[in-house]
Image (cartoon, helix red, strand yellow):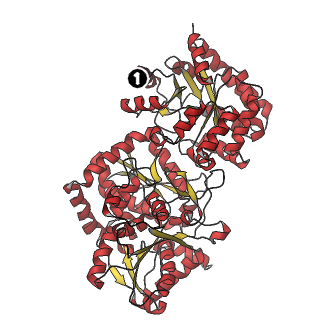
Amino acid sequence: MSVKLTEEMLTALPDARGHFGAFGGRFVSETLMDSLMTLEREYLRLKNDPEFQATFDKDLADYVGRPSPLYFAERLTRETGGAQIWLKREDLNHTGAHKVNNTIGQALLASFLGKKRIIAETGAGQHGVATATVCARLGLECHVFMGADDVQRQSLNVYRMKLLGAQVHAVQSGSRTLKDAMNDAMRDWVTNVDDTFYIIGTVAGPHPYPLLVRDFQSVIGRETRRQSLEKTGKLPDALVACVGGGSNAIGMFYPFLTDESVQLYGVEAGGHGIETGEHAAPLCAGRPGVLHGNRTYLMEDDDGQIASTHSVSAGLDYPGVGPEHSWLKDIGRANYVSVTDDEALEAFRMLTLVEGIMPALESAHAVAYAVKLAATMDKDQMVVINVSGRGDKDIHTVAQLDGIEL
Amino acid sequence: MSRIEGVLQTLKGQGRKALIPFITAGDPHPDETVGLMHTMVDAGVDIIELGVPFSDPMADGPVIQLACERALKHGTSLRRVLAMVSEFRKTNDTTPVVLMGYLNPIEAMGYEAFADAAVAAGVDGVLTVDLPPEEADQVAPLFAERGLDPIFLLAPTTTDERIRAIADHSSGYVYYVSFNGVTGAAKINVDEVAAKVAHIHELTALPVGVGFGIRDAETAAAVGRVSDGVIVGSVLVDTIARNQTDIDALKRALTDLLNPMREALDSLAS
């Protein structure tokens, strides 16, 4: 089923309690409720405050380097032999990924709320780096929680965060990946709620986080829409973005939701293959449940225990997904698909060799699917891939898979 | 009148305070939980909070996180916890049992199926840590129809407006979390707790249980002086962790912890 979305429908979501249809909400322990309600109130006020918006826009331009280019990947298009492939170059942002769009916005919010201590969770380390970066710039104390396994596989980003003055806490509990980092960040927040602002890196978490992260990331889609019209005179036929928590995807999709002609593809981590159970694709193979403050599609067992996930890409290695994606799936507006570790690695190599652009392994999932998709489309059609981050951080992982010691 | 209300009213009539232990079901092993519940009743507890293990216990410190891991390793599902309560009820139909845990296992089972099974098993109350009243509109009527007491948390950060609203959604008792933090942290400030609980008593007629940070007879008495009951969790769970291979020693250790708390609370009655 597919529903024609209108501007009126979109502005009504999330509703006053943070729900996107059956998803979202605010499922947290009582200690955090007052902070979340204050954050929601202040954000809704600042959202329409010209001074706040002007500061945000100025930082995106002068500090992040926006707008990021929309680049025609001519050689990749030729090799694929189908639709034109364009790349939205979020990898060219300061700190190397889309994550900084959101940390700039949330750090601004923290400043307006007078909070001096910042915490964040991170998977691949991109959100941790982006948070440590804005904290360095604003002189804020920064604590980043990262699963112990991710600390190991993303050691470069760990060192970057330390250089930026952040304290990195390796989380030893559970599966020692992103979900456990988020658990420990929540535990820190509940303990230090009076003076601490939690900068969540994705569109998951309790209301109002999915709303405000989506708003801050929507600059990606707004630029893409404008650039596409300027460069080609039309809107793209398809948008492709990887989905872990889903912040780069929602940022790309949101400004196009009412454009019926634009097909949306969110690409989840298929890991070793959906059929093996070793993946991180809750929208493709999970069911609705409640985790980390919101109701959304989850990977869980029959008893409601959260399943362990697998992906070669630390940033997609998460059993949940932003609630707005769950809603977009259920109303049929966006398509959610998956590619395996091997396909993503192949796409990583291909984009590097063919275009001289090394994508993050997360973004390589989008590249892998987009190439397959473009091959089935007409030559006068247009696909935009959100290259959400650059791949420097993944060189150790790729080398290790090649059996090379760096 | 629910079993919880009955017990708390009787205690109030006697001028006594409720001693409410928390243990994680299935820790150290599902076969031992019912025995541990009876041991605690013998040591004089009034209500038992039974933790339903969850893979991602975000509001809990390391002690209860590890208890969840031990319990889950032995397959302690929500259904199995309900079976433990049924077993306990075969020989005890007076001590109220409150299930305490996170929402997702209940969601996975289905609200109505859970509510039916909980009542059939002899559960008296349900405390879902990550379910504030705002999100409880589907489950609340199912509990109310079946006489299950929904128990909600109050925290130091809870505003007066919310205290009233939460009390309106609660029955049995309300659970005041004594400090901002996770379970097992040792940062309780008895003066602050006393002031807040006195204030809560002005806003609601419901009994107030206080948990988080109560580790011995001294803190139990200090908190019991200002509340209607004390909830003791991590210190018991830690005792289970340290005695998990010797169940007889474990039962003695739990009794040795709970007896002085009971005495200290009862000494307040005079």
Identify residue for label 1.
B203
Residue A278: give x, y in percent of width and height.
Answer: 64, 66
Please give the name of the residue rendered at 28% of the width and 83% of the height, measured from the top-left corner: A233
Residue A130: give x, y in percent of width and height.
Answer: 39, 62
Name the foreground residue: B77 vs A141. B77
Q: Is residue A228 above or below residue A25?
A: below
Name the foreground residue: A341 vs B216. A341
Left or right: B198 in relation to B212: left
Please give the name of the residue rendered at 59% of the width and 31% of the height, measured from the top-left corner: B148
Q: Is residue B7 visible?
A: yes
Q: Is residue A234 above or below residue A137?
A: below
Residue A13: give x, y in percent of width and height.
Answer: 37, 55
Q: Is residue A312 above or below residue A304?
A: below
Q: Is residue A186 above or below residue B98?
A: below
| Residue B100 quadrant | top right
Q: Is residue A111 visible?
A: no
Residue A308: give x, y in percent of width and height.
Answer: 62, 59
Tally of numbered discs: 1
Q: Secondary structure at mark 1?
A: helix
Most extreme residue toward the left is A50
Which chain is home to disc 1?
B
Name the foreground residue: A298 vs A74. A298
| Residue A101 quadrant | bottom left
Query: What amino acid does circle 1 point to?
Result: Leu
Left or right: B194 in relation to A343: left
Please give the name of the residue rendered at 42% of the width and 68% of the height, measured from the top-left corner: A249
Please give the name of the residue rendered at 80% of the width and 30% of the height, measured from the top-left corner: B248
Left or right: A60 in relation to A366: left
Q: Quadrant of the C terminus of chain A?
A: bottom right
Most extreme residue toward the top is B270
Q: 10 Å neighbourhood of mark 1: few (<14), some, or many (≥20)?
A: some
